[in-house]
Image (spheres, rainbow, N blue to C red):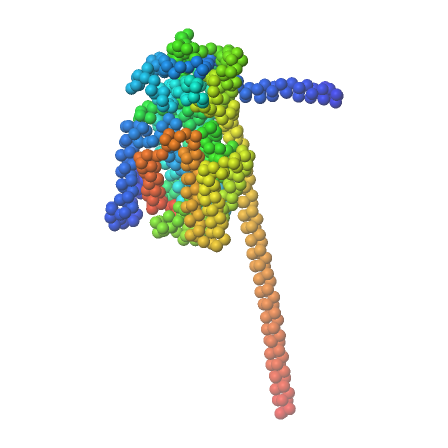
Amino acid sequence: MKQIVDQIKEKIMEKQVPETSWFSPFNVVTGIILGVGLILTILRFTMGLETVTNLDNNTPWGIWIGFDLLCGVTLAAGGYVTSATCYIFGLKRFHSAVRPAILTAFLGYALVVLALHYDVGRPWRLPYPVFYSQGTSSLLFEVGLCVFLYLSVLFIEYSPAALEWLGFKKARNIIIRLTLVLTIFGVILSTLHQSSLGALFMIAPSKLHPLWYSSYLPVLFFISSIFAGMSMVIFEGSLAHRFLHHKMDQTHLDESLGVALGFSKAASLVMMGYVCVKLLGLSLDNNWHYLTTGWGIWFLVELIGFVIFPALLFAAAHREKNLTFARSAALWTILGIVLNRFNISIIAFNYHLPSDQRYFPSIMEIAISIFIVTLGVVIYRFICTRMPILHEHPDYKSH
Amino acid sequence: MAISRRQFLGTLGAAVGASAPLTNTHAAGRQFKGYPDSSGVLHDTTLCIGCRKCEEACNRVNDLPKPNTPFDDLTLLDKNRRTDAAVYTVVNRFAPPKKETTPVFVKKQCNHCLEPACASACFVKAFTKTPEGAVVYDESLCVGCRYCMVACPFEVPAYEYDNPLNPKVTKCTLCAPRLAQGKLPGCVESCPREALIFGKRKDLIKMARQRIMARPNLYVDHIYGEHEMGGTSWLYLAGVPFGTIGMREDLGTKSAPELTSGPLSAVPVVVGLWPVLLTGVYAISKRKDKIAQEEKQAALKAARQEAREEQAASLDKLREKMTQEKTAAINFEVKKALEEAAKGQQEE
């Protein structure tokens, strides 16, 4: 046991790149953000939500749910999308994209759970719904159970990278054999909780604007998680190419264009399907007349500007084999996902209230959200510079 | 034991007949109409004078913190208020639709739904609808996620945002502890105008209907809470449309569990279908790979075979050619030798 601990310690302390200075711009900026985050954390757990947030009795959910939970989970969908593409659908040319996607998903979900600790009143009771008192009639229960299980699955799916790095061959080989089962399990859990996040709002038809309230909410959330995941893989790939290029091996570099263009084509198609379901929902509830109101224009901005437009850009990217198009479309789609989740959870939620009772996040709420994203980036960078994520470990080539 | 066709059909008919009422009761079981003898309160807003005595009593019996403005300060009525962490009930004043009539006062508190949205939404079962009628909250289970507040169509549950570590959700309890002691709810007991009447819900509905029938000019022909969101234990009568006195008329009659039953019923479908489908997709993609691999192998083999045959053919040709050349050379040599021998013979 002690040997194992020593081995881990040694690996972590191992210097990867000779740091020229502790005060690189990246370190300074992240340092400030993390410092502010820590102070706000103390404030949150000593003074309560009232001091840190703008939440009130009419708006119990703010950006910690709208962004950290809803967007966090949706944008972490790249994990199940990429692993399913590679291992279930057998498109092996996506193989080098699986590990970064799984790592992002794992960190994403872990940070979602961390963010929830800030939002809920008694975070130490977060295991209650799973282990102590199961409120099975609640969609939030389904979300909680699935997120708990999927976080465990993602941890196991991610672990081979860590085990290869640490040199634990036997354990690594056992887990690799579980790949298919874990992937299928991941898709089931993702289907359930991605859709349930949308279904959370179905209990409040009187509070969510009819243009966004639909019995298709769960379907829409699930479909949008597919193209959100693909966009994140493309977007993240562009960031990794810029900052972690030296960590990529030839296979990764050779495959990355194919991954981006392949996902561009797929995302474009899925997004058009999403638009169809949106229009179907609009027709079934006969909500067309709302389109002429202010809310309707906002709805169209979201649908045309942030779904149809990037879908066409993705299609163009694939046809022209244009990586810049693909990356721009991916970023645009991600913004669209954030906009959609904000619309449903914050902007079009409580639309009936007078404007002075509406919610707008406080600076401190935004700072905590930035703090949590930054934490994710720092951990991602830490892992990618050390473990075989963007390259294959020399001992395990072609496995 | 032989069964004739007639007998068999007869048994089948009986079986179908017997199962029909079974399915009926099953379907009826889903349409929960509330506990039969549950209690409730009828709030006749035409009688309310906005004295805030109920607010005061509520504050007292629930040991809530004393507010900054005393309860006899009626200027608070100028503001449209809602319940909050320290206030389980509020009375609001609404301007009359016509100038000559008096303003309308409406008391707001938890309506104790028959099928509460908060209880349906709670992922730790912290809310319970008791057979007596109250929707009660168990602090010892609450995680503080506030989904109940999102779910409540009446915007009632409040939260202790100022409590950093042990915040509670708060709302009216229908004075469940007092009811257990045989007392009336604090607000009902204190109402000087009998604008609040406590009783069995089914009796209250009858009473409300009688009042509407007796004075159709005074009342709007609607008992608010009879069907709203599946029905509530608190019922309301009013002389003006409910929409004008802060009560939403677009809530519909579907209860919260009905609203979410669709997505919840999708769970077994996904859990049952996905593993089979995905394993199938995997098997198909693997089989495709295998077939492609085999075809590749076969093509390679054929190509190799062809190359080998071609090679063999050209070798044969070469060999033949060489043999021919060799024979020619031998013949030439023989011929030459013979010629030389003949030449020698001639010389001798």
Q: As drawn, is A125 to the left or to the right of B204?
A: left
- On the question of residue B170 being in view, the answer is no
In the picture, which quadrant includes the N terminus of chain A?
top left
**Residue A55: x, y in percent?**
35, 30
Q: Nearer the viewer, residue A399 or B144?
A: B144
Which of the two residues, A223 or B310, is positioned nearer the viewer here? A223
Percent position of residue A162, x then y: 37, 41
Instruction: Judge whether B259 appears above or below B297 on screen.
Output: above
In the image, what residue occupies the spot 48% across and 29% down?
A205
Q: Quadrant of residue B247?
A: top left
Q: In which quadrant of the rendered view does residue A121 lie? A: top left
Identify the residue shown where x is 36% and y is 20%.
B77
- Please name the residue shown 36% across and 22% down the image: B78
Q: Is residue B240 left or right of residue B171?
A: right
Residue located 42% across and 27% down the image: B150
* x and y percentages locating residue B289 in the rendered image: 54, 48
Residue B183 coordinates in the image, percent (x, y): 40, 8
